[in-house]
Image (cartoon, rainbow, N blue to C red):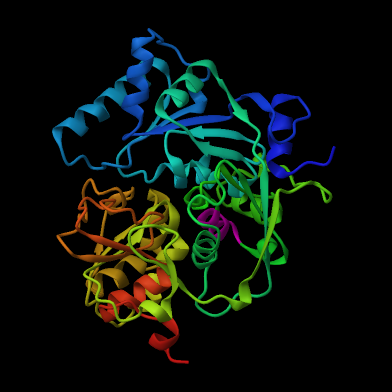
Amino acid sequence: MPQTLAEKILSLASGKNLKAGQTAIVPLSLAYFQDGTGPLGLRQLEKLNIKKLANPEKSIFFIDHSAPSPRKELSNDHMFIRDFAKSTGAIVHDVGDGVCHQIAAESYVRPGDVVIGGDSHTCTGGAFAAFATGMGSTDVAIGMALGKTWFRVPETIKVELKGYIPRFVTSKDIILHLIGLIGADGATYKSLEFCGDFAEKLPMPERLTISNMAVEAGAKVGLFASDNKTKQYLAKYGRENDYKEISSDPDAYYEQVITIEVDKLTPVVACPHTVDNTKPVSQVKNIKIDQVFIGTCTNGRIEDLRYAACVFKDRKVKARTIITPASRDVFIQASKEGLIETILKAGATIMTPGCGACVGVHGGILGDDENCLATQNRNFQGRMGNPKGNIYLSSPIVAACSAITGVITDPDEFFGN
């Protein structure tokens, strides 16, 4: 039976030949929590008197959402996580290590894995051809305890990316364009499978950005086939032995096929207060920006910091600007390349690797009626800590140019046609 990527990955994991609509019980390759959702799950395990985990080495806790902790209550939650991990043998990535999804990409996720996380953007791992998805805290906790979980095998929407990307257009613009096209619920509990000649050319950091935001269209997973780009990325982190090739079958059945001709795209901005409220940058340029935030699991990788430093070199920011590396590894690499010095000389601020301002807990909460242009994945009302603030989403290039001008700026105009 010809299979989509989602069908194939779950079939390989379960040992059964599965198709969309069927129920699969599968062993877990990885289960992880962050410090916002982890304590909720662990308290459920306490209620059930569960004190052991099926696979401690595959159970990981990340302290990234409130790192360093801004309140004593959160500090106590961090202690709770550390104590639980110590008693069970689970792994902890502590303050400063970075965002859970970035560290998972650097160190853990492999092609063919089945991954669950107590965070909706666990779908980032789909860039590896892993069935990676976010779940509720109780579901993840039980998955950790039992070492397995169940899924309904999702139907698949095939997204063909074709052509050559124009100047200043990035993978962030591609996924924002798609979300604007199909809507925030356009792929609810579906698998988005990205393919086509352009998708095959995309390096892993760009794939990670696209998979990361699949959930913003309601998708269960956002998948790419594994290939030489995947192998190269794994080799970068000394994990070349984790590679295996997984792709869909040529005659697999897809519920829908969407074709995006990337050469026709321009930079995209998602306007408040929904991710699918997208517009070309040309239609929103010159809107005043009070804060720019470059970072997160969506766009806090070394490539994104390079974009920012390139724009910032020998210039000064006009908008309050916060840069947060997605991981300790990214921060170290940026320091080695001199990016941190360039960013600081431009007047921007560097924060501890982690989620930072994205979740509105600390490190960049907006004032009333302030506008923020951010490279994160969500712009819901109150997302950055103040329901009276306004969040616009863009690529790192658009964000960096706008930081210099103080208004939303088209990179074509910034650099000159």
Where does residue 15 sit, x and y in percent of width and height? 75, 24
Which of the 4 image quadrants contains residue 401? Answer: bottom left
Which of the 4 image quadrants contains residue 155? Answer: top right
Q: Is residue 352 visible?
A: no
Q: Nearer the viewer, residue 389 or 93?
A: 389
Where does residue 138 sit, x and y in percent of width and height? 42, 23
Compared to 53, does 170 lie above or below? below
Total marks placed? 0
**Residue appearing at x 25%, y 28% in the figure:** 77
- For the stretch drawn in magenta, the main secondary structure is helix
Where does residue 202 sit, x and y in percent of width and height? 62, 63
* Magenta residue span: 203-210
**Residue appearing at x 34%, y 79% in the figure:** 313
**Residue appearing at x 78%, y 46% in the figure:** 253
Residue extending farthest to the top is: 49
Answer with left or right where residue 332 lies relative to residue 7. Answer: left
